[in-house]
Image (cartoon, grey):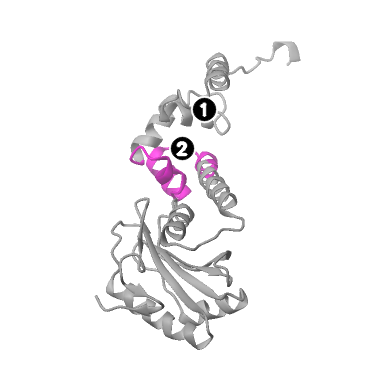
Amino acid sequence: MNASNKKTKTNPHAGHRDRVRKRFLEEGADGFEKHELLELLLFGAIPMQDTNPIAHRLLDMFDGSFTILFNSDPREIVEKCNVSMNTAVFLKALGAISKRCQKEKLEGRVLMNSPETSGEYAVDLLLYENVENFYIFCLDSGNHLIRPVKISKGSQTKAQVEVGDVVREAVLCQASSVILVHNHPGGGLRPSASDIQLTSKLLEALEIVHIFVADHIITANHQYFSFVQNGFLKNGVLEKK
């Protein structure tokens, strides 16, 4: 077949995509609805298709939430929304990049001298997590953050924490004190009986290596609960409630 007789495949949605991109450049994201922003993002993953109905379908299936969508398992996205694995991985990568951006924002020499400071930092760190994670914030003698250390990652309701792992990581960081931190993905800020029991065990273990437990922070639904602020922990001693 003569090359001149071959049909050139064109994108019937090119004009629309150009208009959306131009609008974004001129107006920014504030004027866009959620589905419009997602439609724009999908231009990079889905060529030569109308991504508007796909964006609506994705949001409808994930409660209208970017956070839930971008942090879902790609296989679940494929199954629920009838999109390709390439598209699902693209969306999952967006979630990973968002987390990385948040981590970069949190890096630096942070002074943690109050429950408010450590609580807000913990909320930001765990904002996009949909399973329970347990961290320690290792602090120097001036209450500056050395670094946050993830001890374990669990399920929706539980993260298995080994006392020895906490002690080892705190010692390796040469921490003078630590703040215990974990999230409740299912909501509910109040500490459970197991949260209190674990705190007691860690207080005893860390005291042996002369590391002070400054607080225990629980996060859920963009809020935090501080053991110190709520009278559960006073001067490194667990109070009975």
Residue found 35% across the figure and 68% down from its top: 227
Q: Residue 82 carries which label?
A: none
Q: Position of residue 159 (x, y in %)?
A: 40, 69
Assess disc 2: are there few (<14), some (14-19) or many (≥20) residues with their C-alpha within 10 Å of its C-alpha.
some
Q: Does the magenta stretch include residue 89?
A: yes
Q: Where is residue 106 in the image (x, y as percent from the top left)?
A: 56, 53
Residue found 28% across the figure and 74% down from its top: 193
In which quadrant is the N terminus drawn?
top right
- Label 1, on which residue? 40
The answer to which of marks 1 and 2 sits earlier in the sequence is 1
Q: Do the residues bearing badges 1 and 2 touch, measured as CB atoms within 8 Å?
A: no
Q: What element carries label 2?
A: loop
Assess disc 1: are there few (<14), some (14-19) or many (≥20) residues with their C-alpha within 10 Å of its C-alpha.
some
- Label 2, on which residue? 83
Apparent side of residue 80 relative to residue 22 in the rendered image (left or right):
left
Rendering quarter of residue 110? bottom right
The amino acid at mark 1 is Leu
Q: What element carries label 1?
A: helix
Q: How far apart are marks 1 and 2 (CA)?
A: 16 Å
* Camera-nearest residue between 107 and 114: 114
Residue found 45% across the figure and 49% down from its top: 71
Identify the residue at the far bottom of this view: 208
* Camera-nearest residue between 239 and 69: 239
Q: Position of residue 211 (x, y in %)?
A: 52, 80
Q: Which range is magenta? A: 62-90
